[in-house]
Image: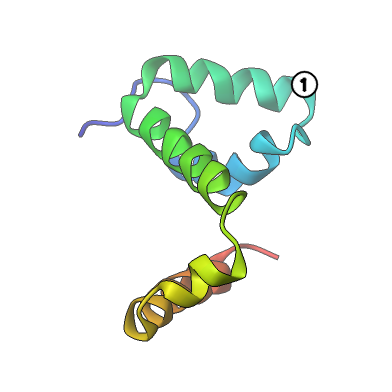
Amino acid sequence: MTPPADDFPCNRFVELVTEYLDDALPTDERRRLEEHLDVCGGCGSVLEQFRTVIRTTGVLGEDDVAAIEADRREQIMTTFRQWASTRPS
């Protein structure tokens, strides 16, 4: 997919998505991010994936998590740890 021709790079969206979802972005940054979402289907898709994960994990109980196969749970945690280790401090 070709990135949109705006001045808000997709990697910047990825850096800010959690702050966006927490409504913690300054107004100007939020506006720029939303303008980017208007023209970038890829980032819009990522945003929807985040929202789906938030909705899903909000209803998972300990029994649900325990029901996930150990190998799969470890894959999920490994992916999360790798993602968390690349986030800027």
The residue type indicated by label 1 comes to Thr
Residue 85 placement, left or right of 82: right
Q: Quadrant of residue 68?
A: bottom left
Q: What residue sits right under mark 1 in the picture?
A: 27
- Quadrant location of the C terminus? bottom right
Does residue 6 appear left or right of residue 56 in this picture? left
What colouring method underlies this structural image? rainbow
- Badge 1 element: helix
Please state which of residues 42 and 48 is positioned toward the viewer in this rendering. Answer: 48
Residue 36 vs residue 64, the one in the foreground: 64
Residue 72: % across, % down: 34, 76
49 lies left or right of 18: left
- Image location (x, y in percent) of residue 28: 73, 20
Q: In the image as oriented, which residue stretches furthest toward the front? A: 63
In the image, what residue occupies the spot 36% across and 24% down?
40
Q: Is residue 3 above or below residue 68?
A: above
User: Is 44 drawn above or below residue 71 in the view shown?
Assistant: above
Quarter of the view holding residue 62: bottom right
- Quadrant of the snapshot with the N terminus: top left
x, y percentage for residue 35? 52, 15
Q: Residue at x 41, y 28 (%)?
A: 44
The residue nearer to you, when weighing 47 against 56, is 56
Up the image or down, 56 lies above or below 13; here it is below
Residue found at x 57% / y 48%: 15
In terms of depth relative to the viewer, which is nearer, 67 or 38?
A: 67
